Image (tube, coloured by chain):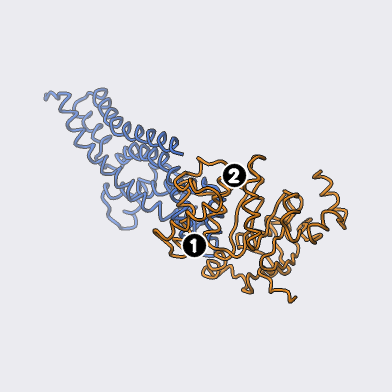
Amino acid sequence: MVPAEPIVDIRGLRKRFGSNEVLRGIDLAVAPGEVVAIIGRSGSGKSTLLRCINGLESPDAGTLAIEGRPMRLDDPRAMRDLRQRVGMIFQSFNLFPHLDVGHNIMLAPGLVKGRRGAQGEARARQLLARVGLDDKFEAMPAQLSGGQQQRVAIARALAMEPQVLLCDEITSALDPELVAEVLAVVEMLASEGMTLLMVTHEMRFARKVADRVVFMHEGAIHETGPASELFTRPQTTELRQFLAALD
Amino acid sequence: MVEFTLWDILRNLLLAARWTVALSLIAFVAGGALGLLLVLARTLPAGAVGRWAGRCVALHVEVFQGTPLLMQLFLAYFGLALLGLEVSAWLAAALALTLHASAFLAEIWRGCIEAVPRGQWDAAASLALTRSEQLRRVIAPQALRIAIAPTVGFLVQVIKGTALASVIGFIELAKAGTMITNATFRPFAVYACVAAIYFAMCYPVSAFSRRLERRLNGAR
């Protein structure tokens, strides 16, 4: 089998905040349709790595390409194009509190893709149905549970029809009983062939859904491999300690 | 000696109060427009232009927040005259109050924009909105809600601040009070009326501000 061209291609990525070097040379290539779980202690650079991929953080060194096209942070048109192909879901949902659920989903497609009116609304309703919230079109975000808000956030990201979805600890702010409903949606996306990069603390979920697990430690990729191997036969002491601390 | 009735006093004060209202409105509207430009300049993305603009706005705000309004009025009136510009008390007062209000409003509104969580910018950016779309469609509507109460509150400060324009000879409510006192020798009655008129102008504004605040908090 000829390996497909990577959809996300990161080489030598470095990022520092002041004197703190958060990313110390990251190399990571993600194939289309691949599901990559990024694990590691807090402060290991997982979220920063994810935020670099859609340009929310600007790297200090290294290159980053999406579908073969290098990222150009100084070119607003290139960034608008890139961000349509790379969606993101956040730990704190970040729904727009002044808009109802329907308009949260329709805002960006209307502005960016010119998809307005009945067409935009039909698409938004369709996406809401996919995340199991067909009856919440007119609800305000504050009226929803955390799990429902996060599912709306997923529908909102999907409305831009991204090829890659970045999930930044998307269940960490949820009450335990609400985690499953969000993970079920992510699992559905994974089974449909969406390329997913997710920073997560849900090890059981990572093991079940991820094709590959990346363990980050002190700003570098410390160990990586298929979920089944990485969790059962960790090669480095750091990963062993990390996994042991979770049990 | 001419006898002045309370109605004579009140009538003349009310006529002068028109100028207080006019000066307040000009300071607030022009100051608001300038303040909006300043706050927009301050939210420019951090580039060479953005940094430079940000510094200029910060300096403007520091100068006008860090000096008494009284000095600003003197400087506008006598300072411009020194430069050879003959300005009326009316124009000098309007100019000083406008600049004064712009600095305070810019700072109030900047605080309101910063009160919108960082994650809102992130979410809007990740959905491919441009910087100006992020600001107009996501940040501004939320900042506006936060801004209404302190902005209307500041309007009350502006109304009372116009009293200082009397020192450069502009005849508004406070100055008219002094002049009428000199004619009637009834300072207590006159100044009580002056205070009552200021109160009648400011109270509805602050009551309105409180009501808006309650309603917006309730709707959240």
Query: In the depicted view, which residue is nearer to us: A240 or A27?
Result: A240
Q: Is residue A215 above or below residue B103?
A: below
**Residue at the location (20% across, 34% down)?**
B14
Give the side of residue A23 with respect to residue B198, left or right: right
Q: Where residue B68 sits in the image (x, y, percent)?
A: 42, 42
Q: Where residue A84 sits in the image (x, y, percent)?
A: 54, 64
Name the residue that disc number 1 marks: B130
Q: Chain of mark 1?
A: B
Q: Is residue A132 above or below residue A227?
A: above
**Residue at the location (22% across, 33% down)?**
B179
- From the rendered image, report the letter of the chain displayed in blue: B
Query: In the depicted view, which residue is nearer to us: A247 or B58?
Result: A247
Q: Chain of mark 2?
A: A
Amino acid carrying label 1: it is Thr
Mark identifier at residue A240: none
Name the residue that disc number 2 marks: A147
Query: In the depicted view, which residue is nearer to us: B2 or B199?
Result: B199
Amino acid carrying label 2: it is Gly
Quadrant housing residue B84: bottom left
Does residue B62 appear anywhere in the picture?
A: no
- From the rendered image, report the letter of the chain displayed in orange: A
Labels 2 and 1 share a subunit: no
Quadrant housing residue B189: top left
